[in-house]
Amino acid sequence: MSTATIFLIVILALVAYIISIYNRLVRHKNLVEEGWSGIETQLKRRANLIPNLIETVKGYAGHEKDTLEDVVRLRNQATSATDVAERGVAEGMLTKALGKLFALAEAYPDLKANENFMQLQGALQELEDQIQLARRYYNGTVRDMNILVESFPSNFVAGQFNFSRAKFFEIEEDADRAVPQVSFESD
């Protein structure tokens, strides 16, 4: 074999390897987009249930106007968020406000017994579970994409074709971040 033939084979192998890495990057990018679409679907379903919940609660706890307005405001803020991180913060605040709303229902036995309220509460709980599943899937695809974007030698190909790190979707909840205070001292 001549030197030119060996050189050509090496160049072709290198090009094939670069194409392979590029295709893996595209596949992972598409998986991230698919994962985000799954999260958005569940979040939209939850956002669509909130007006019905507000109307149901309003009939029983109309004087709890601040809590109801907070839920509506945070719902609008969450649905208008454009960035993944911004959406996570907004959804966390909405989740917290919904928790307050359900805690408020404890003070109204007639509301707790209302069939529509119970169905909405069950549907929202099921959606929270679906959101968690979608979030796990999305964050798994983001992890895989980020590993590929940052690992050698695929990081060179990623840089050349403008692939970048994807952002994880984390719902910020104060309750998740809070450290419980425990005291063993006896008074």
Image (cartoon, grey):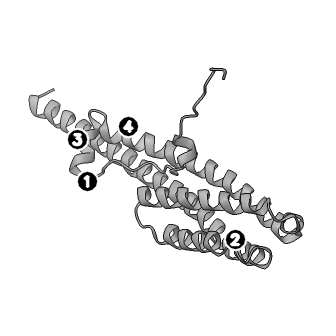
- Dot 2: within a 10 Å radius of its alpha carbon, few (fewer than 14), some, or many (20 or more) residues? some
Q: Is residue 136 left or right of residue 16?
A: right
Which-is-in-front pick, marks 1 and 2?
2
Q: Between 19 and 122, which is closer to the camera in this rendering?
A: 122
Question: How far apart are labels 1 and 4 at the CA level?
Answer: 15 Å
Residue at mark 4:
147
Q: Residue at x 40, y 50 (%)?
A: 167
Pointer 1 with pointer 4, Cβ within 8 A: no
Q: Between disc 1 and disc 4, whose residue precedes?
A: 4
- Dot 4: within a 10 Å radius of its alpha carbon, few (fewer than 14), some, or many (20 or more) residues? some
Q: Between disc 4 and disc 3, whose residue precedes?
A: 4
Q: Residue at x 54, y 68 (%)?
A: 74
Which-is-in-front pick, marks 2 and 3?
2
Q: Between disc 1 and disc 3, whose residue precedes?
A: 3
Q: Between disc 1 and disc 2, whose residue precedes?
A: 2
Q: Is residue 108 above or below residue 135?
A: below
Percent coordinates x, y for residue 113 in the rendering? 89, 65
Residue at mark 3:
156
| Disc 2 residue type (three-letter) | Leu
Residue at mark 2:
49
Numbered circle sitting on residue 162: 1
